[in-house]
Image (spheres, rainbow, N blue to C red):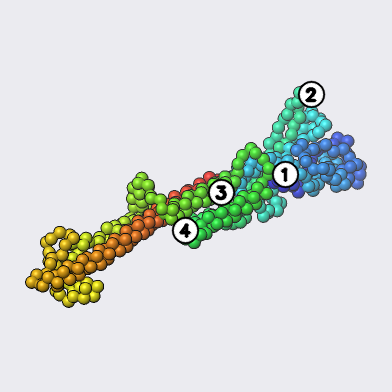
Amino acid sequence: DEKNQILKSNIWLRLYWTDAHLKWDQVEYGGIDVVRIKVSRIWRPDITLYNDVSDELPEIDEYFAAVTSDGYVTWLAPVIVMSSCPLDVTYFPWDQQVCTMTWGSWSFDGGKVNLYNRSSSGDISQFVPNGEWNLQGMPVIRHVDMYACCPEPYPTLEYRIVIKRKSLYYTTNLVMPCAFITACALLVFWLPPESGEKVSLSVTILLTTTVFLLLVAETMPAQSLVIPLISQYFLTILLLLALSTVVTVIILNFHHRGDLGETVPHWMEVYIIGYLGRLVGMKKIVDYNKNKFKSSIFNLEIPTLTSFTSAIHVITPPPECNGTSNVYDMNSADTDAELREPKNLPIDHRRASIKSESNCQGILQNILDELEILRHSQREKSKQGNKITEWMLLGEILDRFSLFVFFIIIVVVHLALLLNHD
């Protein structure tokens, strides 16, 4: 009973002593050398289990003792005893326990009943294999205790039952499932933020690991002397999962910060997007996004009216330009606001031509103004898109870096668990 730290043992109690009052001459009694008598009818030593925790004493007085003619008594009795066994759960479930059973006379000192063991260890040849424990040995140590109340020595026999736990059950039902679930926690950093399930996946894995920790707590005794190795393992995994949840929330905050129009700080752009991006193998993606937005912003240039008109060699005015069909020479070196006047025309035609030129300039200026507005709008959209993409790229870099870091930490934790449990 690990919760109450009690060892329940089914043992064969073997006691041997000599009683001078039970001697006889076998010749006088027809050659009878051995008789069997209920132990309740003869004297027997009050050998008691000192660390017994059972509510009642075992009923063993009904068993027979074999008495020989020289007064040698052999008493063999099967008995079920319950003894206290303080557990050291430091390396649970790869632990080895040493439970003691201390036997001695309760009333007689060593001068009356001198207690010895017939061998240096208990007999474990009839041990029945257990599904959870292996019996490693049962050495016996004889002690002679002195008490303040009495000057006489009191000998005792201490049987040390060395048992080692079979860890297969706990490894396959607790450690390995937790390791698999922890490996799934790495998927949190691989899952795209657009899915909206990163935090929920991390919290689900965190709660699942908590359930495993509760199962371990139900198995072990409630004591505060040491923290078991498996509890350290689960607490470390819980801490890693909690940190992964916090990191995921921070990364999601970075990922969506571009929607608010914020600009990536310069130090983040240099150290995280620049250096850290190369470290995690995202240099090509970073360079591609930088070149893409440079070309989309800086190649949108709107010409002035002079550069626009000087680039045209021949233009046929539209109907709005007074309906004239004259051909104009637009290769002018004049000022930006003037077009070259046509020559050799009557005065009325020249006035109409000037009016037509003025209308054409107004139309072209309106076109350029609209293009400038479109250019400005596109520039702002490109800048906003650049901000959003930079924050998203920052989040992806942190996601991949966190994936590598947590992978290394998880591997180190599991290696430490495997190397320390012995």
Marking on residue 149: 2
The nearer-to-camera label among 2 and 3 is 3
- Vertical placement of residue 112 versus 32, above or below: above
Q: Which residue sits at x=69%, y=46%? A: 2
Distance in Å between CA atoms under marks 2 and 3: 54 Å
Answer left or right for 277 relative to 82: left
* Pointers 4 and 3 in contact (C-beta within 8 Å): no
- Vertical placement of residue 137 versus 306, above or below: above
Q: Amino acid at mark 1?
A: Asn
Specify which label sits upstream in the sequence, 1 or 4: 1
| Mark 3 Cα shell of 10 Å, populated few (<14), some (14-19), many (≥20) | many
Q: Is residue 98 visible?
A: no
The nearer-to-camera label among 4 and 3 is 4
- In the displayed image of the protein, which residue is found farthest to the front? 348
Image location of residue 81, percent across then percent down: 77, 45
* Pointers 2 and 3 in contact (C-beta within 8 Å): no
Specify which label sits upstream in the sequence, 3 or 1: 1
Q: Amino acid at mark 2?
A: Cys
Q: Amino acid at mark 4?
A: Pro
Specify which label sits upstream in the sequence, 4 or 3: 4
Q: Which residue sits at x=74%, y=32%? A: 155
Quadrant location, the C terminus: top right
Q: Which residue is mark 3?
A: 238
Viewer-proximal residue among 152 and 66: 152
Answer left or right for 17 relative to 97: right
The nearer-to-camera label among 4 and 2 is 4
The nearer-to-camera label among 3 and 1 is 3
Marking on residue 4: 1
Viewer-proximal residue among 144 and 289: 289
Marking on residue 193: 4
